[in-house]
Amino acid sequence: MPHQNGTQTLLIDADDTLWENNVYFERAIANFISFLNHHEYSPAQVREVLNGVERECILTHGYGLHSFAHALVETFERLSVEPLTPALHETINGFAHTIAEHPVEIIHGVPETLQYLAPRHHLILMTKGAIAEQTGKIERSGLKEYFAAVEIVAEKDLPTFRSVISKYALPPDSTWMVGNSPKSDINPALAAGINAVFVPHDNTWILEHDEVDEPQPPCRLLMVETFAGLRAHF
């Protein structure tokens, strides 16, 4: 087991691993779809359009509330028979801004688990998104003290993982990526030659869904039901 090998490096995701995140976006999307009240498209069909628009907005605006607000406005413009007035624009932006106003909700068992892990292992917080937004959440979470370093990246893909591994000279056999997203946490980490711990979350963003890759030896993959389950392995 990992803990028999001494100190490990744990790269730990933030959104929906340490604190709730996507559930607030889901609520905003539900409110937006209800507000749009489309007479031809079902809510599921509207959501499909929004998913596609979000993918487009990520390419131009990155991740975060700014990109999300753009996606809502663009979806409204594509589907609504009404013109987008300044008042409607403000209302639609309001759905996104309600997320920013929500306090950081730490997932159950996270502080105690980080408190347990921090003296035993090398913890690096690795999250993607807008720097100002992610920095704000990290500061408000009260969890920063447990981490030796923080990496806020634009994307979590193979080149990014290779860059972080190189930056900190991380030994692959004792380095693990811990997170809830197969697409951004688990699969690119395994592709980069390090180990991974999958912590499933019921509300993982649909654009982060993917099949979890089989690890190629010597890489290892663990799955724990909750973040607190890390204590059994590290």
Image (cartoon, helix red, strand yellow):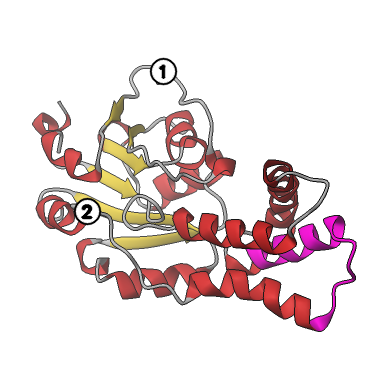
Where residue 102 sits, quadrant-wise, is bottom left
Q: Which residue is mark 2?
A: 108
User: Residue 229: x percent and y percent?
Assistant: 18, 38
Residue 225 shown in magenta:
no
Residue lying at 72% horizontally and 57% vertically, measured from the top left: 57
Identity, as a three-letter code, of the amino acid under mark 1: Gln
Q: Provide the secondary structure element on which disc 1 rests.
A: loop
- From this viewpoint, is residue 137 visible? yes
Q: Provide the secondary structure element on which disc 2 rests.
A: loop
Q: Which residue is mark 1?
A: 216
| Horizontal side of residue 214 vs 146, given as left or right | right
Give the residues drawn in magenta, as a range: 67-86
Where residue 92 sits, quadrant-wise, is bottom right
Return the residue found at the far front. 39
Identity, as a three-letter code, of the amino acid under mark 2: His
User: Residue 138: x percent and y percent?
Assistant: 35, 69
User: Residue 115: x percent and y percent?
Assistant: 12, 57
User: Residue 181: x percent and y percent?
Assistant: 45, 40
Residue 79 shown in magenta:
yes
